């Protein structure tokens, strides 16, 4: 067989070049694991903390089974203005149901038809229960996935599923790559949290927690029921949820509002292992929103500025810094 020497050499050079690109990418990811974070004290503190708790030669080493990190969802890893995303989903779902069933004259469908947000704001439980009632959990997930891919945010004109904060997704990936067990604990409904967050983060469904709804077992499937259970997942409910899930205190926590205070303090109260807790300050009206989170003044809690610490807000973000 005659071998074309020139073609052979070109293939060799091409293979070497591809190998170089792969190695360069790996090296870049290793040297800059949080590329959407601006260099500064907060980014460095996170890197130093992870290095310390994962280095077996460090006095702060933490075994993998105890490297637990807990995050809030709304406003911490996912946009929450002008309304929490679960409410955007609820209104989208109810509006479509009202349009498909014009003879459905009861509330909240009449309010949805009229655009009566005042009524809906005052009847959040009714709105939430009707959004998905009777669907199997798989059917509900399909609805959430469709919403996340198609319904666009009024300010950014991007699908809600694209409005996870890229720096936070990088942080979650970085922690998981370093042996952390990452939990999301949200005040939003549990199956919404699971269906919305899993595609964006690849965090296992078992680690995604929210407000639990009654489930009805029918024909070997689970249907969404007509009431919420009492174990809330805000305030003290966050540490309770974490303890039920893990039996241990987290060593890392991240939130953004007063509903996260107890979770943040819980992580920082870890006396057995070095711990870290941060809260995200929404102080960037140009690229997102400005609003107060009401987070308590907790000793050793670090404030992360969206304006100064985030090089970009969303994936493929072209907005100016």
Image (spheres, rainbow, N blue to C red):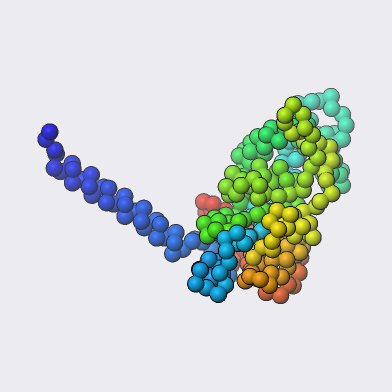
Viewer-closest of 249 and 311: 249
Q: Is residue 245 above or below residue 297?
A: above
Tell me where residue 264 appears, x and y as whole percent.
71, 65
Q: Is residue 118 visible in this depiction of the protein?
A: no
Residue drawn at point x = 77 percent, y = 45 percent: 212
Residue drawn at point x = 44 percent, y = 61 percent: 30
Residue 72 falls in which quadrant of the image?
bottom right
Viewer-closest of 86 and 212: 212
Residue 7 falls in which quadrant of the image?
top left
Q: Is residue 183 above or below residue 136?
A: below
Tell me where residue 218 appears, x and y as whole percent.
77, 29
Instruction: Assign the N terminus to one quadrant of the image.
Output: top left
Q: Is residue 291 left or right of residue 173?
A: right
Residue drawn at point x = 61 percent, y = 47 percent: 204
Q: Is residue 165 visible in this depiction of the protein?
A: yes
Viewer-closest of 15 and 161: 15
Q: Is residue 187 left or right of residue 8?
A: right
Tell me where residue 67 appears, x and y as whole percent.
60, 62
> Farthest residue toward the left?
2
Count of marks overlaid on the render: 0
Q: Is residue 284 above or below residue 212?
A: below
Q: Is residue 139 left or right of residue 217?
A: left
Residue drawn at point x = 73 percent, y = 58 percent: 243
Instruction: Assign the C terminus to one quadrant of the image.
Output: bottom right
Tell me where residue 276 appears, x and y as whole percent.
64, 69
């Amino acid at each position: 067989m005659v071998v074309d020497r020139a073609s052979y050499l070109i293939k060799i050079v091409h293979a070497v070049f591809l190998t170089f690109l792969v190695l360069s990418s790996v090296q870049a990811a290793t040297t800059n694991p949080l590329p959407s974070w601006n260099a500064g004290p907060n980014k460095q503190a996170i890197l130093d903390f992870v290095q310390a708790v994962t280095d077996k030669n460090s006095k702060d080493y933490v075994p993998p089974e105890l490297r637990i990190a807990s995050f809030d969802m709304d406003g911490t890893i996912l946009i929450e203005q002008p309304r929490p995303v679960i409410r955007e989903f609820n209104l989208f779902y109810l509006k479509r149901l009202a349009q498909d069933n014009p003879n459905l004259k009861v509330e909240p469908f009449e309010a949805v038809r009229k655009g009566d947000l005042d009524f809906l704001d005052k009847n959040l439980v009714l709105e939430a229960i009707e959004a998905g009632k009777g669907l199997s959990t798989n059917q509900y997930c399909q609805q959430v996935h469709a919403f996340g891919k198609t319904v666009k945010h009024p300010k950014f004109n991007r699908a809600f599923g694209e409005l996870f904060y890229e720096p936070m997704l990088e942080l979650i990936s970085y922690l998981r790559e370093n042996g952390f067990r990452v939990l999301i604990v949200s005040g939003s409904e549990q199956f919404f949290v699971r269906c919305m967050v899993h595609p964006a983060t690849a965090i296992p469904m078992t680690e995604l927690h929210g407000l639990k709804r009654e489930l009805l077992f029918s024909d070997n499937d689970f249907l969404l029921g007509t009431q919420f259970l009492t174990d809330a997942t805000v305030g003290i409910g966050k540490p309770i949820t974490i303890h039920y899930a893990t039996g241990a205190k987290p060593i890392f926590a991240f939130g953004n509002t007063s509903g996260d205070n107890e979770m943040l303090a819980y992580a920082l109260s870890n006396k057995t292992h070095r711990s870290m807790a941060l809260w995200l300050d929404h102080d960037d009206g140009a690229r997102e929103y400005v609003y107060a989170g009401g987070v308590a003044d907790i000793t050793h809690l670090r404030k992360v500025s969206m304006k100064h610490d985030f090089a970009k807000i969303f994936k493929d973000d072209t907005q100016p810094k």
